[in-house]
Amino acid sequence: MATVADIKRGLCIEHNNDLFVVVEFLRFQTGRGSSNMRTKLKSLTTGKLIDHTFGGDEKINIQTIERRPHQFLYKDEQGYNFMHSQTYEQLLLTDDLIDAPEFLMDGMENIEVVFHADKEIPLFAELPQFVETTVIYTEPGVKGDSSGSPMKPATVENDVRIMVPLFVEQGERIRVDTKTREYKERVK
């Protein structure tokens, strides 16, 4: 068992019979008492964020997680099929374990699947922060409509709808942030 002094960003802990990752933490002290730790925790099973304050003398149960590189193979009626990049073992995940399944494309690499190291169970899959995709459909930009930073709707591969700047044309390759679903830049 570790103490709250061991808490740091990215640490995986067991709390209330669930696994959480520490997103933020702040150590504070009230008067002459022991220091406390105010944290923001993200549940690995539900994805919910919670705020929790640990007392200075509380013990925490640190869990070991491993990130393993995988390649997305295909989707079928049972779920999403991945393959470990070094061992070639295949893995089936449901869409609730994938952070942005709408951006998955057959053959996509550099997907990190996070496993609970002791129990060998997959917790979630994380796509790269940016993916390259092709604009399938968008309306042409209107000249003169340039006050501020005007955006227009566009449909990219896998029928995902995002907002893009007016200068982006149909058929262009763009980079999209998978966390925010926002346009980042054109791909040269």
Image: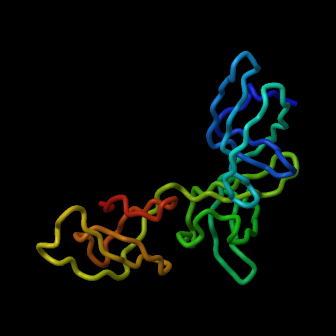
Residue 110 x/y as whole percent: 57, 56
Q: With respect to residue 62, does 181 lie above or below?
A: below
Q: Quadrant of residue 72?
A: bottom right
Residue 85 x/y as whole percent: 66, 56
Residue 98 x/y as whole percent: 65, 64
Nearer to me, 187 or 177: 177
Residue 13 x/y as whole percent: 78, 42
Q: In which quadrant is the C terminus drawn?
A: bottom left
Q: Quadrant of residue 169?
A: bottom left
Residue under the image location 64 percent in, 35 percent down: 25
Nearer to me, 22 or 93: 22
Q: In which quadrant is the N terminus drawn?
A: top right
166 horizontally vs 99: left or right: left
Residue under the image location 69 percent in, 58 percent down: 47
Residue closest to the far front: 31
Q: Quadrant of residue 12?
A: top right
